[in-house]
Amino acid sequence: MKKLAIALLCALPLLACAEEREWAPYKKIIETVKLDKFYSLPAAERDKLKVYARFTPVNKAIAPGSLKLTVVHADGKSPLVLDEQGRTVIVPTEKWIAEDAKIWTNQPKGEKAGIGFDLVAVVPETAQWNYASVMGSVPQANAAIDKVAGALSLFAPTMKVVIFKFRKPAQLTVQAKGGEKRYATDAKHQIKLKLDKALLAENPLVTVSEPPYEAEVDGE
């Protein structure tokens, strides 16, 4: 989702760190990333997707994974655990929004960060699944972007592929009626699978030599 993240980052305002390490209102982050709209979609329209909020420091010397963000609310403090890419899953908490909770950061005053979101496919933690259960994330992502991003969806590419990411060389096989389709990981231990509408309708079995640790929905 790199292209989508870039498009959103260019379209959204950058938030500066506030005094005393208070960074931004929790509600502002939820609305900026449009998480409220995503989670308001019917479950059947987002069940194949997982959404990450991505925080990208403007200062390239700051590693995204080094950011420390904490929600300070009436009941205490709740850290937002970011991965090395500066991503975290935030399911909106209505109570925190109502009480105007704040997000604090470990970054000094003056540092800024862009905010966007990434979408990944939900993949079963097994070595096989039916094609549509995972590749159906592509049309679902496009529909969700149209509804969630609104006018910003014009800047987002059309999602076309799922990039399966593995920790070591792996293989993926689609057991289609017309014959098996076999794929092997590239130098980055990834397999890029473009959506095939005929296979989506056929819904054949897909097997992998090992479960991927992530499946990124992308427009490449």
Image: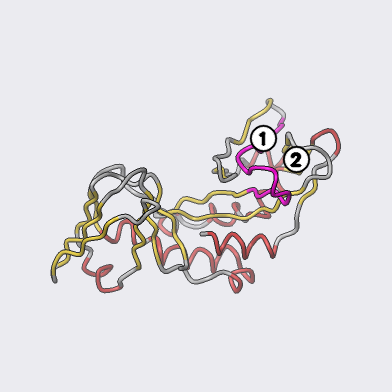
Provide the secondary structure element on which disc 1 rests: loop
Q: Which mark is residue 32?
A: none
10 Å neighbourhood of mark 2: few (<14), some, or many (≥20)?
some
Query: Which quarter of the figure has residue 137?
Result: bottom left
* Residue 184 image position (x, y, % from top left): 27, 57
* Residue 39 image position (x, y, % from top left): 53, 52
Q: Earlier in the sequence, mark 2 or mark 1?
A: 1
Residue at 69% x, 25% y is: 76
* Residue 183 image position (x, y, % from top left): 26, 60
Q: Which residues are magenta?
A: 55-73
Q: Is residue 2 above or below residue 55?
A: below
Q: Is residue 50 above or below residue 181?
A: above
Provide the secondary structure element on which disc 2 rests: loop
* Residue 220 image position (x, y, % from top left): 46, 68
Query: Which quarter of the figure has residue 132?
Result: bottom left
Q: What amino acid type should be assigned to the residue bearing mark 2? A: Asp
Q: What amino acid type should be assigned to the residue bearing mark 1? A: Lys
- For the residue pair 53 and 185, the one nearer the viewer reads as 185
Number of numbered discs: 2
Residue 69: in magenta span: yes
Which residue is labeled 2 in the image?
100
10 Å neighbourhood of mark 1: few (<14), some, or many (≥20)?
some
Left/right of residue 50 with respect to residue 15 in the rendered view: left
Q: Residue furthest top?
A: 76
Q: Nearer the viewer, mark 2 or mark 1?
A: 1
Residue 80: in magenta span: no
Left/right of residue 15 with respect to residue 131 in the rendered view: right
Which residue is labeled 1 in the image?
68
